[in-house]
Amino acid sequence: MNNLVALCAVGAEKILGNEIKLLGYKLVGNAPGRVFFTGDDDALFRSNLCLRTADRVYLEMARYHAEDFDQLFDGVYQVAWQDFLKKDSKVVVDKVRTYKSRLNSEHAVQGIVQKAIYKKLGDVWRMSSLPESGEQSDIRVFITEDEAQICLDLSGLPLHKRGYRTDGGVAPLRETTASVMLQLMLWRRKTPLHDPFCGSGTLPIEACLYAHNVAPGFGRRFALENLPIFNANRAHEIKCAEAEKIRTDVECRITGTDIDPSAIQRARTNAEHACVMAGRALQMIGSDARIERLDFDISDFKDLHAPYEKGLIICNPPYGERLGEEEQAKELYRSMSSLFTDFPNWEIGVITSNKHFQECIAHYASTLKDLKAGNLDTTFYMYNGTEKEKKGRSGGSGGAKGEWNRKPARNKFNSNRGKKEWR
């Protein structure tokens, strides 16, 4: 069995842990932003291919006590690196994280670990220097209370880079964060879902992949594929097995709107790439089935109302972090209070780093979840309907089934004229 480490946004450890258990692997612990688990050799590839909320997956090479640099060096040297790296590999200790440990100089730890790896490889292969002309292999080091954990990166590019998004626009939401949000809202494929600030389409696209059981890693390669331990034939078999799980017979009502026409164009393009990715996966098993394309349209969120009695609004509105934009964001959040009237009986989930969100929208969330991805601290505000009842905002059955109906535009349509329909 292999010891593996999956990274995620701080606050998403439980969600990622549930994913790992559903894949059939055993959880052995967690730390902020990390989940530890064990798995067979298939897990090295399958976890990268299938995990929606993981940012990276590492293979743990060693774990041992290290109070000084000699102990650190010796522990790294003991690893059979020659079985995991090629003679032309370029080894990079990309990051070091220390916590309550005697060894707390990240730069010094990087140097010692890299020196130990090259020393071991040089001794085994009887080479005074290594060419470093091949693919890069990244090593990450965690030292917690004097316990060193040496990890080999199996992912390469962060796993939120699925391969379908060619243009994210300004400040796009990470695909992994979008998947965490969907899981936190306990969203199910039969529930209508709409993103009124869809931007490049990340939330609707991730919902679509989840609803159709499309593994998120079908459209990309992983660092594992450059290592001598990689079994290409077995990886192909795993891909085919996951392709068999794709469902094209499910009915989903997933939509997105944005006031910016260029954002809608990006969302449509990215969604098409994601559907093509799924189609190619299906072709691996001889199927010509297709996933139904998503609906995106240009609209101000204030011009929409619910076409179904119940559903989920989930979104990533502007945070107002740039200089001079905070007041604009606050005004936007105030106007977003109309969502509780225009989408009665719907659940609502909003992610933002702006601390004034609840104050501005004048509704206090049923549940709050802090999420930290990278250097950005965000909070996911979840409204399950209780607060709407307290404010007397329940009622309304929505528009006609199967259509998104726009409210009559102000100063353009009167109440006696037909609603504009978004199909």
Image: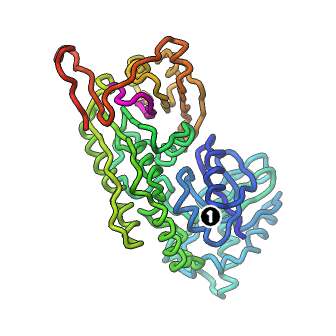
Q: Is residue 388 above or below residue 235?
A: above
Residue 109 picture location, percent across and down: 70, 59
Disc 1: which residue: 139
Identify the residue shown where x is 57% and y is 82%: 87
Count of marks overlaid on the render: 1
Q: Quadrant of the C terminus?
A: top left
Residue depicted at 32% across the width and 46% down the height? 294
Classify 10 Å Cα crowding around label 1: few (below 14), some (14-19), many (20 and above).
Answer: many
Regarding residue 52, the answer to whether it shows in the image is yes
Q: Secondary structure at mark 1?
A: strand
Please determine whether, in this image, residue 308 is positioned above or below residue 52. above
Percent across and percent down for residue 13 are 65, 46
Q: Residue at x 53, y 26 (%)?
A: 383
Hey, what amino acid is under mark 1?
A: Ile
Residue 330 visible in the snapshot: no
Which quadrant holds residue 67? Answer: bottom right
Colouring scheme applied when the structure was drawn: rainbow
Q: Is residue 259 above or below residue 232?
A: above
Q: Residue at x 72, y 56 (%)?
A: 27
- Any magenta on residue 309? yes
- Residue 252, given in percent of the width and then of the height, sits at 39, 45
Please state the extent of the stretch shown in magenta in the rendering: 305-318
Based on the picture, tell me whether residue 185 belongs to the magenta stretch. Answer: no
Q: Nearer the viewer, residue 394 or 38?
A: 394
State left or right for residue 146 relative to residue 271: right
Task: Tell me where residue 420 sits by quadrant.
Answer: top left
Quadrant position of the N terminus in the picture:
bottom right
Residue 188 position in % (x across, y down): 50, 42
Q: Predominant secondary structure in magenta?
A: loop
Please tell me which residue lies in front, 151 or 258: 258
